[in-house]
Image: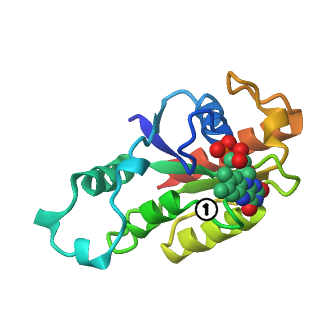
């Protein structure tokens, strides 16, 4: 059966380098894989435990977010770093699935991309801690901070740096192999 991989960008920006990088990763998926892009980040309400109790009362966007995660065999999250942290909209989305547990044992690759030399590694570290707390399965070689992103990614999303593109391929292999074992 087809393996479904869900891409989640932490940037809402139209010309986001993280979203372009995610598309580029999507195009590297092996045959028999369907890559989907989660589009609902900005539609999620602000998380509050008060809104998270009654299933019948649950916000429709939250319901869809959880369903898209459940339908995915694996996830790829690609995020900017905002002020040394994960953007609020992405953290908000993750807070919505702490109680419902969609990330539990989910093979998940994590990336940060930034024009700065450290590639947003502080946000990547924070994202990793959050996902580990939710028991996501992050394979070895599936956590990458991409520095100088404005230089290495073209407008069409193609990655021009051969070292980065080879680590992206390794990431895709590690992620899909992990997902195939489940
Ligand atoms: C940034 N940027 C940034 N970069 C970084 O490496 N560390 C940081 O702490 C921050 N902080 C930060 C805060 C805010 C509010 C903005 C708007 C930007 C720069 C950021 O990496 C750059 O804008 C990226 O291009 C954002 O990713 P997208 O939108 O291109 O995917």
Q: Residue at x 51, y 50 (%)?
A: 75
| Front residue of 120 and 25 | 120
| Front residue of 14 and 4 | 14
Q: Using residue 163 as the reference point, say whether residue 7 is left or right of it.
A: left
Rendered location of residue 94, percent (x, y): 46, 64
Q: Residue at x 61, y 28 (%)?
A: 27
Rendered location of residue 151, percent (x, y): 85, 34
Write down the quadrant of residue 98 in the picture: bottom left
Q: Is residue 158 visible?
A: yes
Rendered location of residue 112, percent (x, y): 70, 53
Q: Residue at x 47, y 55 (%)?
A: 182
Residue labelled with disc 1: 138
Q: Using residue 143 as the reference point, say whether residue 147 is left or right of it.
A: right
For the N terminus, give its image quadrant. Answer: top left
Helix, strand or loop under label 1? loop
Mark 1 vs ligand 1: CB under 8 Å?
Answer: no
| Front residue of 103 and 45 | 45
Residue lying farthest top? 156
């Amino acid at each position: 059966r087809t393996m479904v991989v869900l891409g989640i960008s932490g940037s809402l920006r139209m010309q986001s380098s993280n979203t372009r990088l995610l598309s580029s990763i999507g195009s590297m998926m092996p045959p028999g894989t369907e890559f989907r892009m989660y589009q609902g980040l900005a539609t999620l309400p602000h998380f509050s435990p008060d809104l998270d109790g009654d299933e019948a009362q649950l916000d429709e966007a939250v319901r869809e977010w959880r369903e898209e995660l459940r339908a995915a065999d694996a996830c790829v999250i690609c995020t900017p770093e905002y002020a040394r942290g994960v953007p609020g909209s992405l953290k908000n989305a993750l807070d919505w699935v702490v109680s419902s547990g969609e990330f539990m044992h989910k093979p998940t690759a994590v990336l940060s991309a930034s024009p700065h030399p450290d590639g947003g590694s502080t946000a990547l570290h924070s994202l990793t801690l959050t996902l580990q707390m939710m028991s996501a399965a992050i394979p070895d070689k599936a956590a990458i901070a991409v520095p100088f992103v404005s230089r290495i990614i073209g407008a069409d999303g193609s990655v021009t740096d051969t070292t980065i593109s080879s680590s992206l391929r390794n990431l895709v292999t590690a992620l899909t192999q992990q997902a195939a074992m489940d």
